[in-house]
Image (tube, rainbow, N blue to C red):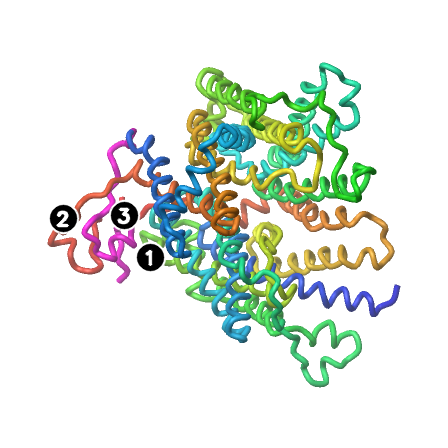
Amino acid sequence: MNLAVWVTIAASAVGAATPLILAALGELVTERAGVLNLGVEGMMLIGAMSGFAVGVSSGSLWLGYLAAAASGMLIALLFGVLTLSLQTNQVATGLALTLFGVGLSAFAGRSFVGLPIRPLLPLRIPVLSELPWIGPLLFHHDPLVYLSLLLCALIAWVLKRTRVGLRLRAVGESPEMAHVLGEPVIRIRYLAVLFGGAMSGIAGAYLSTALTPMWTEGMSAGRGWIALALVVFGTWKPWRVLAGAYLFGTVTVLQLYAQGLGVHVPSEFLSMLPYAATIMVLVAICRDPKTILLNQPASLGRSFHPGY
Amino acid sequence: MPPRGSLVPVFDQLHWPLRLERRQKPSAAMRICSSPLAALAMLATGLLVFAALGKDPVAAFRVFFVEPLNSTYGVGELLLKATPLMLCALGLAVSYRANVWNIGAEGQLTLGAITGGGVGLFFGPALGHWGQPAVLSAGVLGGMAWAAIPALLRSRFRTSEIFVSLMLVYIAQLLLSYLVHGPWRDPAGQNFPQSQPLSDSVLLPSLLQGTRVNVGFIIALVLALLSWWFGTTTAAGFRMRVGGLAPAAAAYAGISERRNIWLAMMISGGAAGLAGVCEVAGPIGMLQPVVSPGYGFAAIIVAFVGRLHPLGVVLASLLMSALYLGGESAQMELQLPASVSGLFQGGLLFYLLAAELFIGFRLRRAHRLPSAAPAGGGGA
């Protein structure tokens, strides 16, 4: 096996990882504010559908991404109203969001199934992208790949170094204390949920306009859940989530290339790999209870009632 | 600066004439009414959706809910489709009451179909009279085995059963797909990805002449009774409920969390496996790549709409089954997409969660006190 094949695999792993990064970073911010939104899969599908639909109808992919972010936010708002204002159970509401998103995207996107779209193309960075090996690996990707890296750095910095990040984390660790100190807990949580929705929407649109440029029902195939698991795997830290996503991207892509590489295993078993890998990394990270206890936002998944 | 001290901030900030107020104690009436209210709200939304799609709402209602049911065959179909939903949801209700979030019933159902179907395929003719019980037990064991994985990982490594059980859905579906495309494919099946048909000796007997409903429905009803008995009279059922409601108190009282997790997973997995084998040994009659149109996921909604109570689950599974039938009927007669059912199912759960709010809260006319009027003030 030659190096060129491995470069191709690594380069496509970057593409496969990007939607996971976007969705997981959004969910990370939501969870750091103490809200567990299990509806990522549903929001991704809504984003994939609306991004594709607007992209095809308007001819502009950027309008599509805008629509995907907006629709992701809209459905996340529904989640927010239920869990934050009406204080429903976050787990149940998140599941409802996923089931609803699957149904709604299939219903609203039915006339777009099978339509072609001009996909999001890689940037050709002059000179650099022509470098051997390093060029295709680092400098020949679409803009969202770079955006996801930028966002990761930005989120890591905001969470760790800025007042906004401190307030967000305070709300996620101890909403009661933050409330006493005058923080608008519910409002901050709303903003975090909306941010998560926008990111999931964009992640979905990346699936339908860049990774596999088409729309089919249920096309996210569990990626929303893998993104959720990545947040745990990354112990709620942006850079670790990024690393985890690239690991998963590699597993996903290896599975596609395996047959070409002469691995004679039925394709179904190869397709199981990302799901099995998710289970294995979760076990690996949860084995030591301290890892979770020390890193998980202390009030994750708990409703907060201000005003008594 | 930020307005604080509000019970439900969005409502307060909008200065609605009504406000939500916590009840002194949860309303018993609302506890019963929340599900029917949610169903009504869903119905109203459904009619609006039909109108928005340019269909006459009344005619659409007739096609969706009346026509599928106005024949014996139709009622049989209602009970037939309610069976897997009821089986899965009964198990899930027990599990959710114990605060164990098994959301992979679809995978356990698929594995029950594989193990039950496998026993039926390879040993069916040899088993004679014991064919049906053997196939059903194999299905239950298959579902349990699949649920044992999240149970083990949760109780030993504290790995979230939500993720593990869900990931196993995809793995089970791929396994089934491999079997019917590969080793279990019917050589005489003209290359269709399906197994040989199961022999008559393992197929479940029909319940009503002229319909497809089979004894699986009776089994589901018996299980509903059993789960009622389990929840209300047995110590294990009580321990599970305490563990779900107050984990700290349960631990203090010496109730084993590990045992609760295992029990919840085995009950919900076994029930889902039974649902799977009832489909394979019932209406499908063979193994094929897809054995369920998402019954395991719809059962999550059924469990909640049934308010995690056996009787509620029985009623909710009939409602959900009617939604499936209505969706099929609307697809054929109104050229509406089949996905409209999925939309209604998800919407129903949203309405239910919102309606449950009124168990603990009530709407009151807002009496705006002078001190509470300025922006930024609110009840302390």
Read off the residue under disc 3: B7
Q: Where in the figure is residue B269, as x and y percent of width and height?
A: 60, 30
Q: Nearer the viewer, residue A175 or B192?
A: B192
The residue under the point 76% across, 28% down is B121
Dot 1 lies on which element?
loop
Q: Which residues are the magenta region?
A: B1-28
Residue B248 appears in the figure: no
The span from disc 1 to disc 2 (Cα, nearest Å) is: 24 Å
Q: Earlier in the sequence, mark 2 or mark 3?
A: 3
Q: Nearer the viewer, residue B175 or B238?
A: B175
The span from disc 1 to disc 3 (Cα, nearest Å) is: 13 Å
Read off the residue under disc 2: B367
Task: Categorize mark 2 by other alpha carbons within 10 Å: few (<14), some (14-19), many (20+).
Answer: few
Amino acid at the residue labelled 2:
His
* Residue A156 inside the magenta-drawn segment: no
Task: Categorize mark 1 by other alpha carbons within 10 Å: few (<14), some (14-19), many (20+).
Answer: many
Q: Where in the figure is residue B9, as x and y percent of width and height?
A: 29, 53
Dot 3 lies on which element?
loop
The residue under the point 41% across, 32% down is B307
